[in-house]
Image (cartoon, helix red, strand yellow):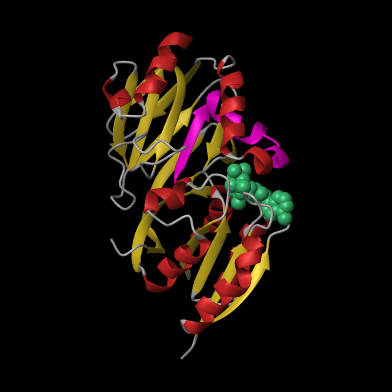
Amino acid sequence: MYKRARIIYNPSAGRELFRKHIPSILEKLERAGYETSCHATTGAGDAIRAAETAVERRYDLVVAAGGDGTVNEVVNGLAEKKYRPQLGIIPAGTTNDFARALGIPKDFEAACDVIINGKTTSIDVGKVNRQYFINIAGGGTLTELTYEVPSRLKTMFGQLAYYVKGIEKLAWLKPTRVTITSPKRVIDEEIMLFLVANSHSVGGFEKLAPKAVMNDGYFDVLVVRKTTMPEFLKIATQVIKGDHVHDPRVIYFQTAELKVTSAYPVQLNLDGERGGTLPSHFKVLHKHLVLRTPPN
Ligand SMILES: Nc1ncnc2c1ncn2[C@@H]1O[C@H](COP(=O)(O)OP(=O)(O)OP(=O)(O)O)[C@@H](O)[C@H]1O
């Protein structure tokens, strides 16, 4: 019996280089025994629909080729369904945090080899209200910076655009009072931001949530309490080594479930994309998706 693979790619992702590699990627997958077809996404939300269609058509494998935004949309198209094809990732975006956390190579061909020859790993998926995330969710003023960089600017300057915009945005970071309720603890105070991580690698920081494991059934929650801006910047510099989790202004814990509410309109960010506003109910869906990952 032959197998079928659907490549869902974002032609505008990253430096728009993926399209040129399609013939060789198709060849590789066909040689590995997959009858393969492609879907080029047309705009926001299209990868969700494409993934839903791949479920209906009973594909064995869905390959998400793009950045974290595309991977997030594909996950949103698969996560709700009873039958879920396996997921492969080709990191073709500006930000490929999730692929990096999994150790998937940046080279398209090498990433395709991982899909073909790698192992299958069941990983947790985060559910927040009616949406899903695979890498990280966050709330607070700082997390708004990711969607304020126009797409063209990102194509030209890549990651650099984030940092320039990020520095500008830091001045706008405002503490907000939120209530975070998990089975073991309640936090009710003014905070700078909160992060709910499934993996340890976010925004190029390998140790943002140092204890996070993608299939342990838990989120790693990081809360930065109200601080002054110089203090906040000091915490930010500690992130490089993972020392921030020991800072008294940082709360770090693991939980499979939490609720976050606020009397103020706090924006949510899911895998770098806009995710609505609080209140939010976060739940781990343990080992919910099967991914193709590098052998070690
Ligand atoms: N054909 C298209 N043209 C423009 N935008 C698109 C197209 N297809 C999808 N998109 C949008 O592009 C967004 C970003 O995609 P993706 O993450 O794959 O790339 P990226 O280069 O890493 O960008 P980002 O860093 O913003 O995530 C997606 O959320 C999607 O809504």
Is residue 43 shown to the viewer in this render? no
- The residue positioned 72% from the left and 41% from the top of the image is 152
Where, by quadrant of the figure, is residue 283 drawn?
A: top left
Residue span colored magenta: 134-153
46 or 9: nearer the eye?
9
74 or 284: nearer the eye?
74
Q: Count the marks.
A: 0
Q: Residue 47: where, in percent of width, then height?
A: 63, 59
Up-down: is 44 above or below 161? below
89 or 109: nearer the eye?
109
- The residue positioned 28% from the left and 50% from the top of the image is 216
Horizontal placement of 89 versus 147: left or right?
Answer: left
Q: Is residue 24 magenta?
A: no
The residue sitting at the bottom extreme is: 1
- The residue positioned 46% from the left and 91% from the top of the image is 1
Q: Residue 266: where, in percent of width, then height?
A: 56, 26
Up-down: is 240 above or below 290? above
Q: Residue 55: where, in percent of width, then height?
A: 56, 71
Quadrant of the image for the C terminus? bottom left
Q: Residue 64: where, in percent of width, then height?
A: 55, 61
Where, by quadrant of the figure, is residue 293 drawn?
A: bottom left
Q: Is residue 142 magenta?
A: yes
Horizontal placement of 63 versus 120: left or right?
Answer: right
Is residue 72 shown to the viewer in this render? yes
